[in-house]
Amino acid sequence: MDREFGVLRGFRESLPEEFELERAIVERSRDVFELYGYQEVGIPTVEPIGIFEIKSGEEIRHRMFRFTDMGGREVCLRPEGTPAIARMVATKMRDRPLPIRVGYVGSMFRYDEPQRGRFREFLQIGIELIGSSEPLGDAEVICVVDALIKSLGFREYYIRLGHEGILRGVLEKAGIGEEAQNAILSRIDRGKVEEAFKIFEEAGGDAEYRELVSALLEPTAGNDLEMVDNIRGLVGDIERCRFSLDNLKEIFEILTENDIKNVKVDVGFARGLDYYTGMIFELYCSGIDVALAGGGRYDRLLALFGWDVPAVGCAVGVDRVALAMRERGFTLRTRKVERVVLSPIDRESSRYAIRVANRLRGMGVGVVLELSSRPPGSVISRARKAGVRFVCFVGPRESMENTISVRDLKNDVSFVLDPEGVAKIVGGSEPRL
Ligand code: HAM
């Protein structure tokens, strides 16, 4: 095909069987959200640039799909959902009792370098818990993601848990301003530690604290809580660090008590979004070196929209979860209605076929209608290939008697029934039409 008309780099088409898995993941997430009291909301796909320029972080700002709309406004395709939720809650949901729990599902767009599990359009499922600064809230968000990942069948995965206040506390103490702190943390997030230290020096950071940053970035040994205690010794008098370590420890303990044991505390962990103020985490599974989910606490973002309340949340990347599931051979069924194939045996019976198909659909049975009459053998072999168990035929006799001839391909038997009888044996769902 002419390259000009091909799918753009980093974008994906999902064939029916691929899409079914993605849809199933989304449906499962909705079920899990509901169990925890999160209500789904809708947010715009196109946004003014400014909403992400304030706090989304250098990396995302540089990778937005920006354009000027026909009204001359500088807009972008949303690279993430959190700022839009912060705006919605701060401007339209202030009269509701706190905490507010909302969820969203939608495509996000980032001009990332495409690679395995990294696309330019990807589907995120997010939850945000607004109005609580309790460690229980931080833990809840992680529990929701953990419950979802477990319910999808994953067993080998781990949660990397950190706290934005640890590195920031040291950088602040070293006399580094917020903008340079953001730049340093963004480099650390991308593994560019040398660049991070260069910015540290250029920003006039106190050399004494450079060593402390280095120590925090060391892959530390020992059990997680011991490690936190060791670090507490190192950061000694820096109050923000001490508070952050205590907070991290409390969240870690709640998780452990809730049977979430695969948590690795990482005191030198940074995430690429500038709005984080507290706990941060990412979830990884074996075989894929990019995160399946990520999130954290952002206590100052809503204030930018006029309501100073704390918040915490996270987002799961559906494309990455689907990729990991496919590689593990995990399946998830979504088809809720049982499908039958219905074929008129001659042209004259097609009107009756449409009527009877609609009756069956009214009783919750999915019906795929053969549009032109073919020999029964061909209808049956096509149905078999498609994995359909029941094939229905209607002709002049059925039309007169208001019946359907059904062939059960699994048991190799045939019978004649009225539409209600067919719905009964096929197992229709709740009437939908
Ligand atoms: P994030 O870590 O940038 O956080 O993205 C969350 C998840 O989206 C990632 O863990 C990953 O699964 C998926 N994702 C990100 N970029 C790509 C990509 N290029 N291709 C495929 N999947 C990708 C956020 O977006 C925050 N808004 C999360 C949050 C909510 N924090 C607080 N509340």
Image (cartoon, rainbow, N blue to C red):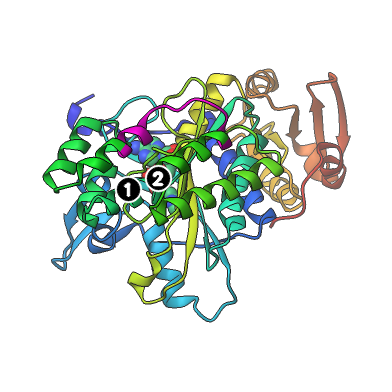
Q: Measured from the top left, where is residue 112 in percent x and y? A: 27, 36
Residue 336 in view, yes or no: no
**Residue count near mark 2 (Cα–Cα under 10 Å), binned few <14, some 14–19, many ≥20:** many
Q: Is residue 19 magenta?
A: no
Q: Measured from the top left, where is residue 61 in percent x and y? A: 23, 50
Instruction: Give the label on residue 235, or none.
Output: 2
**Residue count near mark 1 (Cα–Cα under 10 Å), binned few <14, some 14–19, many ≥20:** many
Q: Is residue 214 magenta?
A: yes
Q: Measured from the top left, where is residue 284 in percent x and y? A: 50, 31
- Badge 1 element: helix
Q: Quadrant of the N terminus?
A: top left
Residue 258: quadrant of the picture: top right
Residue 154: quadrant of the picture: top right
- Residue at image position (87%, 39%) is 417
- Badge 2 element: helix
Q: What residue sits right under mark 1 in the picture?
A: 170
Q: Is residue 139 above or below residue 146?
A: below
Name the front one of labels 2 and 1: 2
Which segment did they paint magenta?
Answer: 212-225
